[in-house]
Amino acid sequence: MKVLSILPLVALLFCSCESDPMHTEQYTQAAALYSSKQYVQALPLLRSAAEAGNPDAQLLLAKCYDFGNGVKSDMKEAVKWYTAAAQAGNSNAQDNLASCYLSGSGVPKDLGKAFELYSQAAAQNDPSALNNLGLCYRNGEGVSQDSVKAADCFRRSAMLGDANGQYNLGRSYFHGLGVPLDMEQAKYWVKKAAAQGHKNATAFMEDNQWI
């Protein structure tokens, strides 16, 4: 009788796994723990969901290894999970993986690959990737230098609320790089970045006596 009483529960668990192949429930629990900085508790849930192919879990697991959250920092392991999530189309993972290739962290330095990944994420209107793509154009990293395209990327990033994009767009107007020199626009965008706590923007305002 005891065996029979267990069978419905086993069947229920089996159906639950079948109906949630990406371990979405585990990821949801893990994400809540991660956001409250309970990284050690989040890790086994993240790993389970990541191994099941959940790209959001793969991204957070990569960040754990990248920043040493609940586990010893390991950039090779971070790159492994960033790559898995990036290949699934996760723009945040593409942006972070691009930065790894840009700096040679966990992978051999490859500016062309970094530019390619930033472009993929930017095509999804990822604010951080748009700013980083702008930096590639501005600095000629992985692509020919183009201040006009750089300013356009910064503008798109800034319009989506990214503080780095706002700061870089403001500096573009300040120096007349890729856009007409315009002090009012420079002040406007740098101030918006500073309002979000961007330290370089605040310092830039102080240097130019805008405060």
Image: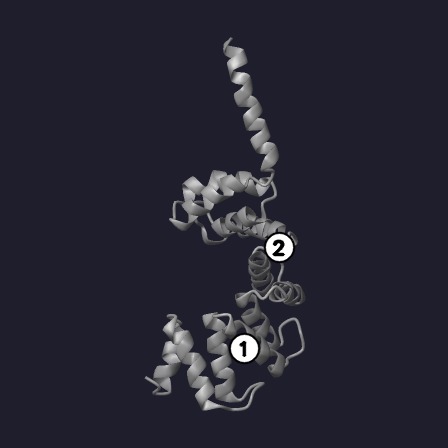
Q: Which residue is the extreme one toward the top? A: 1
Residue 65: image location, x then y, percent: 50, 49
In the rendered view, does 28 fall on the left or right side of 125?
left
Q: Which residue is mark 1?
A: 155
Query: Does 111 appear above or below 171?
Result: above
Seen from the viewer's position, the closer of residues 104 and 88 is 88
Q: Which residue is mark 2?
A: 86
Residue 119: image location, x then y, percent: 64, 67
**Identity of the amino acid at label 2?**
Ala
Seen from the viewer's position, the closer of residues 103 and 160 is 160
Residue 92, quarter of the rendered image: bottom right
Residue drawn at (58%, 49%) of the image: 55
Query: Does 126 appear above or below 49?
Result: below
- Give the number of callouts: 2
Residue 185: image location, x then y, percent: 47, 86
Q: Which residue is the extreme one toward the left? A: 211
Residue drawn at (65%, 63%) of the image: 120
**Identity of the amino acid at label 1?**
Arg
Residue 188: image location, x then y, percent: 43, 83
